[in-house]
């Protein structure tokens, strides 16, 4: 779901209510780049209450207007619908040629198209494929008092339904917040009511990711009312935040190297496989042979995440790197062959596994000599992540 695209669409003129309704529903399937839209026509018709013919016509119009791009045509097999992407530049720059929903004319003899009809009139048989009965207005108009009362009743009903929706969404969110059992629910409800409709939607969408991010760093959760009033889910997009969402970076890039060094600076994994009989003999014998076995096992099993990074590098696949590390890596410098050799010696002295030989020709490291550069990098990580007490 792309809240960003949906919120923009609500403020746009797309040439008619049916076109806007369908565009918003399509955005509900898309990511923030407008990609990954492949609901079937029947599903769209059921969810928008438009006829299948109307859905097909508007989709074709969107493609012709350049708003939608066909990525892959439907294969004809069940469950495999046409896949679309939004062209966001065309979508956000779209100006309708005509306003109002285009209406297919009635072609049956002996009937006259009622030009005064309103509502969903996108095809000959109406939105739901049935013939509508036109109700003539009464000869005597309703009194102003009755009209005012009817309008008031409709408004009150809408308010009640809206209030129920807000309350339902609050309950859905609140029962999943980790501190709800010890929280003040009234305070949380007041904070929820103070949010806009769009903010509540984003909150519902992003809170699960926020909770997972805090658990991943073993952080503490604030009270629900504080989370809501501070809009803490926005920290997911802040590169300096502990809970910022990681992004994928290519092997041997600056950010990749920062992620590698950060992993190697952690204490090595102690849950290693049992040594072989031959290795046990060498370990018992002591001396250089035993030290060589310990170093070899440390490089192989001490940092599982590093093993994954190296394996992905052979396949030219990137890995996720925390935003704070990516930000710190911006000052990394490309090193020459001599400096690279000194870095290799620093790795070996610590028992760290050296970089995989994939044919890559240049590497980035923190500026300065390895020992001093590693110390500075470690201190920078501590500064970046050490000033948040709770999330």
Image: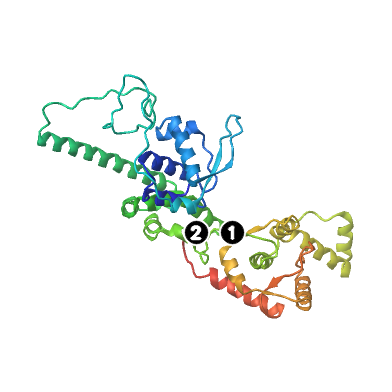
In the image, residue 378 lies at what x, y percent?
62, 73
Depth check, mark 1 against mark 2: the one in front is 1
In the image, residue 197 lies at what x, y percent?
35, 50
**Closer to the N terminus: mark 1 or mark 2?**
2
- Identify the colour scheme used: rainbow
Q: Nearer the viewer, residue 292 or 131?
A: 131
**In the displayed structure, would residue 284 be above or below residue 38?**
below
**In the displayed structure, would residue 23 be above or below residue 227?**
above
Label 2: few (<14), some or many (≥20) within 10 Å? many
Residue appearing at x 53%, y 65% in the figure: 239
Name the side, left or right, on which 305 lies relative to 86: right
Q: Kindly identify which numbered label has been placed on residue 375.
A: none
Q: Kindly identify which numbered label has been placed on residue 236.
A: 2
Which residue has dot 1 on it?
Answer: 247
Residue appearing at x 14%, y 35% in the figure: 147
Label 1: few (<14), some or many (≥20) within 10 Å? few
Which type of secondary structure does the marked residue at label 2 adopt?
A: helix
Q: Nearer the viewer, residue 386 or 153?
A: 153
Name the side, left or right, on which 153 lies relative to 22: left
In the image, residue 133 lies at what x, y percent?
28, 22
Q: Nearer the viewer, residue 88 or 178?
A: 88
In the image, residue 124 lies at what x, y percent?
38, 27
Q: Nearer the viewer, residue 237 or 128?
A: 128
* Distance (Cα) linking label 1 and label 2: 11 Å
**Residue 125: which quarter of the image?**
top left
């Amino acid at each position: 779901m792309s809240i960003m695209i949906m919120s923009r669409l609500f403020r746009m003129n797309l040439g008619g209510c049916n076109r806007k309704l369908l565009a918003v529903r399509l955005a509900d399937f898309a990511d923030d780049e407008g990609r990954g839209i492949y609901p079937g026509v029947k599903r769209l018709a059921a969810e928008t209450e438009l006829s299948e013919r109307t859905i097909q016509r508007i989709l074709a119009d969107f493609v012709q207007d350049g708003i939608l791009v066909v990525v892959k045509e439907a294969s004809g097999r069940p469950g495999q619908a046409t896949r679309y992407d939004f062209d966001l530049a065309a979508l956000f720059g779209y100006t309708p040629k005509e306003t109002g929903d285009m209406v297919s004319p009635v072609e049956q003899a002996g009937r006259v198209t009622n030009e005064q009809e309103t509502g969903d009139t996108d095809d000959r048989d109406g939105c739901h494929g049935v013939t509508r009965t036109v109700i003539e207005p009464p000869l005597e108009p309703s009194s102003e008092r009755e009209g005012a009362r009817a309008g008031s009743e409709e408004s009150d009903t809408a308010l009640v339904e809206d209030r129920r929706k807000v309350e339902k969404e609050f309950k859905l969110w609140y029962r999943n917040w980790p501190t709800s059992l010890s929280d003040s629910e009234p305070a949380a409800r007041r904070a929820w009511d103070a949010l806009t409709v769009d903010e509540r939607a984003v909150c519902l969408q992003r809170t699960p990711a926020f909770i997972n991010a805090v658990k991943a760093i073993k952080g503490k959760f604030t009270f629900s009312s504080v989370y809501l009033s501070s809009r803490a889910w926005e920290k997911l997009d802040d590169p300096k935040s502990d809970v910022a969402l990681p992004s994928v970076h290519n092997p041997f890039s600056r950010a990749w190297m920062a992620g590698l060094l950060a992993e190697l600076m952690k204490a090595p994994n102690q849950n290693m496989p049992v040594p072989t009989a031959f290795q046990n003999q060498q370990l018992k014998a002591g001396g250089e042979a035993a030290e060589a076995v310990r170093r070899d096992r440390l490089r192989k099993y001490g940092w599982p995440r590093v093993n994954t990074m190296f394996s992905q590098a052979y396949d030219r696949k990137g890995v996720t790197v925390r935003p704070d590390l990516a930000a710190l890596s911006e000052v990394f410098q490309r090193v020459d062959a001599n400096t690279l050799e000194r870095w290799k010696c620093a790795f070996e002295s610590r028992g760290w596994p050296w970089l995989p030989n994939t044919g890559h020709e240049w590497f980035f490291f923190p500026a300065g000599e390895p020992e001093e550069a590693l110390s500075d990098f470690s201190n920078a990580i501590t500064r970046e992540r050490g000033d948040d007490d709770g999330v």
